[in-house]
Image (cartoon, grey):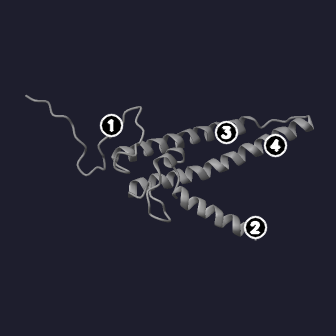
Amino acid sequence: MSEIEPGPVEGSKMKAEIFLPEDYRPAEDEPFMNERQLEYFRRKLENWKAELLDESRSTVETLQDGTRNIPDVADRASEETDRALELRTRDRQRKLIAKIDSALRRIDEGEYGYCEVTGEPISLKRLDARPIATMSLEAQERHERREKVHRDD
């Protein structure tokens, strides 16, 4: 009798695990946003999000544990400044997590890696450095120049 490997449950949305060597890096000589590239960026984004969430959990624990009565005014002010800075950092990270979620959604929808302004591919180097990028470098620079001009008014 032959052994039969259990397959995915009928009707479930299981997809095949894409093999990605540990040292894989997207290359210009392969088709743009192929399965391996998409999986590479998906994992990169998911790992980044997990790190941010871990840091966030430790901050909440620290803030909860750190509530104590400090008699020295200077020490108390210093601690409150540290807390305010920590909370601002966490707020920035919360916004970053929203951008990561948006990038993951674009991967699922097949839009990841393409400039939202021009529709052209975003360079792999840019995506590797900033996987949440939504614009090509040129479009981003134009956007920032316009923003600067309007800010100076």
Q: Which residue is mark 1?
A: 19
Task: Give the Cα separation between the discs numbered 3 and 4.
Answer: 15 Å
Q: CA distance from mark 2 to mark 4?
A: 31 Å
Q: CA distance from mark 4 to mark 1?
A: 47 Å
Question: For residue 147, what is the image quadrant?
Answer: bottom right
Q: Earlier in the sequence, mark 3 or mark 1?
A: 1
Nearest-to-viewer mark from 2 and 3: 2
Dot 4 alpha-carbon crowd within 10 angstroms: few under 14, some 14 to 19, many 20 or more: few
- Place of residue 75 in the rendered image (x, y in percent of width and height, measured from the top left): 87, 35
**At numbered mark 1, what does the secondary structure look like: helix, strand or loop?**
loop
Please, what is the three-letter code of the amino acid marked with disc 1?
A: Phe
The residue tagged 4 is 81
Precedes in sequence: disc 3 or disc 4: 3
Q: Position of residue 29 (x, y in %)?
A: 36, 45
User: CA gap, disc 3 to disc 1?
Assistant: 35 Å
Of the numbered discs 2 and 1, the one sitting upstream in the chain is: 1
Q: Earlier in the sequence, mark 2 or mark 3?
A: 3
Residue 59 shows which numbered tag?
A: 3
Q: Quadrant of the C terminus?
A: bottom right
Q: Quadrant of residue 56?
A: top right
